[in-house]
Image: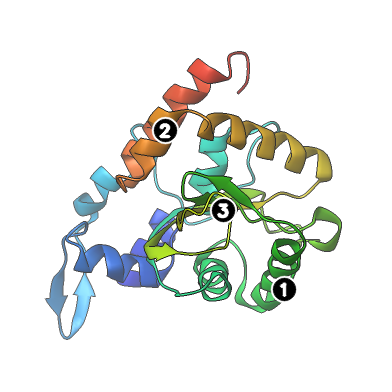
Amino acid sequence: MMSIQEVARELRVSEKTVRRMLWRGELKGIRVGGQWRFPVESLADLLPSGVAASPRFSPPPRGASIRELIDIGGIHYRIAGDSPHEVLREVVEETPCVPAAVRPALFKAIWERESLCSSGIGKGIAAPHPIVPRWAPRSDIPSCIGLFFLERPVDFGYVDGEKVSIVFLLLLKTLQEHLRTLARLVRLLREDSLTAFLHEVPLRPAILSELSRLEKAVLPGEP
């Protein structure tokens, strides 16, 4: 049996996300002495096929795919907030591979970037990302992308007028990696089939599987 903390570590999400998954019926647990406990086998359906859970955040391979970067940053549900400021602060708090001590500086960098230029991609999707020279993560923080589904749509004031319900947070260590990854993500999100699929708020294994399939189809020759 596993605790909430252990499940969060294995699924690479925050403890808050585990509790939300429990409330939504996506995780099966039992109460033991006032604490939630989860059978190990209950995690099987939440892990991508052929991938074992790991307690550490291993750095992505060079030239990592979008799917690999999201696997590190995690997929998170029911993100609260009634304004862009509140949503982005919650997004930073939910990012498991960033130590708590670093999060205030990361949020400041993200908010400064958002204030300078919109991170809206369209179709109800935002992709905030700090300016790379100002975002100097420690060597133990891997490059990653976090995928966040909001509890309710929030008006970010984007020119297309659509409220945001999906956020991709990009945290890349070099400018070259940042530009390459952002271009790849934008190319994938031009596919109406992917954006429609994401707005259905599917579970983690289905998202990772679809990203793998689509990257091979849309970005041939890429990892």
**Label 1 packing within 10 angstroms: few (<14), some (14-19), many (20+):** some
Tag 1 secondary structure: helix
Q: Which quadrant would residue 116 be assigned to in this image?
A: bottom right
Whole-percent x, y for residue 68 in the image: 54, 38
Tag 2 secondary structure: helix
* Drawn side of residue 216 relative to residue 150, left or right: right
Label 1 sits on what residue type? Lys
Distance from disc 1 to disc 2, alpha carbons, whole Å, reads 30 Å
Residue 1 in sight in this render = no
Label 2 sits on what residue type? Leu
Chain-order first, disc 3 or disc 1: 3
**Label 2 packing within 10 angstroms: few (<14), some (14-19), many (20+):** some
Chain-order first, disc 1 or disc 2: 1
Q: Is residue 193 above or below residue 88?
A: above
Whole-percent x, y for residue 39 in the image: 19, 59
Q: Which residue is mark 2?
A: 194
Of the numbered discs in the image, which one, if any, rests on residue 108? 1
Tag 3 secondary structure: loop
Q: Are marks 1 and 2 in contact (CB under 8 Å)?
A: no
Distance from disc 3 to disc 2, alpha carbons, whole Å, reads 26 Å
Q: Residue at x 45, y 75 (%)?
A: 82
